[in-house]
DNA sequence: CGGGCTTCGCAAACACCGTTCGCAATCAAC
DNA sequence: GTTGATTGCGAACGGTGTTTGCGAAGCCCG
């Protein structure tokens, strides 16, 4: 048995006798999440995670098959932060509530958007999230495939939104904006120039705190009936 | 001057006398794109790109500030593959044409979706793309900010779509599906179970080749009027 | 032509990285 | 107590991004 170590959270009975394994796996994941929250995803190296736990890098491989698997565990662990108790009965507000929670979770874990988008995985907690979304949409007449698309879009759009949010405070984003302005005035890009001037006037006026909700609402009502 | 090397494609006059630099930069980018197309993004290391050009890794740093900048150059170079000559006059079909081209480009460069989503940048060609989209939407009454959101969503949703397309043929995706089925029958997830059985019956029946277009059409009509 | 200045190519080195191997230590069960 | 599996981990392998320094090549101008 034990052929090639399946998806990590599958991990069947694992034979064996005593196994504190699950606890250590959770601790490793927590340490990795902590590190990523504080220093970014690049800081999550096997050596540094191990050091945070007061042990050596090689020890981690008893609990985690590879670094990528650890990243999957991190992603799934954040899905445990959802709270599904509030239910209104209408699918749209309930989905928007999920989206708002997703946004908050991603704000807490700035490394999450990149992982969600580049390696979509459904661990135990991710499955709970999917179950909740499907349950909210249970009475909706859309075909199941479209409900799945809506779920994927909810994640992707939220990730994109938070990513953009984070990028605008970044230093390189300032240079991006400067470059855009430069290109616009340099000609050949009249639409961009127009957009920049109009953006300069209406800037930061409207309450853009819930621009996320209205955007996501439009996307969801567009995809689902 | 020359403080800290600005966004790479800005690169002002650079003083200097002779400079074949631009050509070399394009050649380096092309070599990196080639490598990524054939062996994936992880294969794009400075040493391997340099080897493909018959030179040493250190030489690349004369033309490229860092590996991340090379990745940005790769992303922007793919934006040169768009063709904006076809114009219908209606914004929706024109945007769907852009989306279809984006999908095809990403299919040609399977590493692109991850880059587009994790490090959104607008190089010279990316700016042309944005200009085109804004031009298509010039007569549309939506506020400029929403047009930008539509642009970002077009990219993100396309990336997500191609990513999913690629992932389903992957080996680990099979195990994901198996895990999902296991979870569903193991109980506590009735909605997922229902979805799996319904998906099993309607599988591969409908022509899903243009499911991308209909999905993107719904998203765009949802976001814009 | 000859110097001077700039640009270029690149070997070597540094500090990491993910991962594997092998062995010592630990623990469970009989 | 002995046996057998499970765990911890130092050391090593091959790779990575990036910096430094120096020699070679090119260009301009006198």
Image (cartoon, coloured by chain):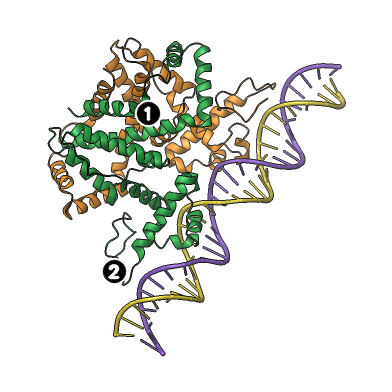
Chain colours: A green, B orange, C yellow, D purple
Q: Secondary structure at mark 1?
A: helix
Q: Is residue A149 visible?
A: no
Q: Name the residue rendered at 43%, 25% in the picture.
A: B79
Q: What chain is tagged by disc 1?
A: B
Residue closer to the observer: A223 or A212: A212
**Residue A137, percent across and down?**
17, 37
The label nearer to you, 2 versus 1, is 2
Relative side of A65 to A43, left or right: left
Left-right relation of B116 to A96: right
- Pointer 2 residue: A15
Vertical arrangement, residue A97 with respect to residue B91, above or below:
below
Chain ID at mark 2: A
Image coordinates of residue B211 in percent, x first then y, are 22, 30
Of the pair A203 and B50, the residue shown nearer to us: A203
Q: Quadrant of residue A87?
A: top left
Quarter-of-image position of residue B18 = top right
Residue B11 % position (x, y): 59, 24
The quarter of the displayed image where residue B218 is located: top left
The C terminus of chain A - image quarter = top left
Residue B114: x and y in percent read 40, 37
Relative to residue A78, is residue A20 depicted above or below? below
Residue receiving disc 1: B105
Residue visible at 38% across and 61% down? Answer: A24
Q: Secondary structure at mark 2?
A: loop
Question: Where is D29 relative to A105, above or below?
Answer: above
Find the distance from the CA under tag 2 to the CA under tag 1. 47 Å
Q: Nearer the viewer, residue A155 or D17?
A: A155
Q: Is residue A144 left or right of residue B61?
A: left
Pointer 1: residues within 10 angstroms few (<14), some, or many (20+)? some
Q: State whether residue A59 appears in this view.
A: yes
Residue ID at (26%, 25%): A218
Label 2–label 1 contact, CB within 8 A: no
């Amino acid at each position: 048995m034990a052929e090639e170590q399946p998806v990590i959270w599958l991990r069947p009975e694992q034979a064996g006798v005593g196994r504190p394994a699950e606890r250590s796996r959770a601790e490793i994941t927590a340490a990795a999440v902590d590190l990523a929250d504080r220093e970014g995803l690049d800081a999550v190296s096997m050596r540094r995670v191990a050091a945070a736990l007061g042990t050596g890098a090689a020890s981690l491989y008893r609990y985690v098959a590879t670094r990528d698997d650890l990243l999957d565990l991190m992603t799934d662990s954040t899905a445990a932060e959802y709270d599904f108790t509030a239910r209104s009965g209408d699918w749209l507000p309930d989905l928007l509530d999920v989206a708002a929670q997703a946004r908050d979770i991603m704000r807490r874990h700035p490394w999450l958007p990149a992982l969600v988008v580049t390696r979509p995985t459904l661990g135990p907690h991710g499955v709970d999230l999917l179950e909740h979304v499907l349950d909210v949409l249970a009475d909706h007449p859309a075909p199941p495939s479209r409900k799945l698309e809506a779920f994927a879009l909810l994640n992707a759009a939220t990730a994109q939104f938070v990513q953009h949010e984070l990028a605008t405070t970044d230093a390189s984003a300032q240079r991006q904006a400067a470059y855009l302005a430069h290109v616009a005035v340099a000609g050949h890009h009249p639409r961009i120039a127009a957009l920049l001037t109009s953006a300069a006037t209406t800037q930061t006026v409207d309450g853009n705190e819930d621009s996320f909700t209205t955007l996501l609402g439009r996307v969801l009502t567009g995809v689902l009936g």
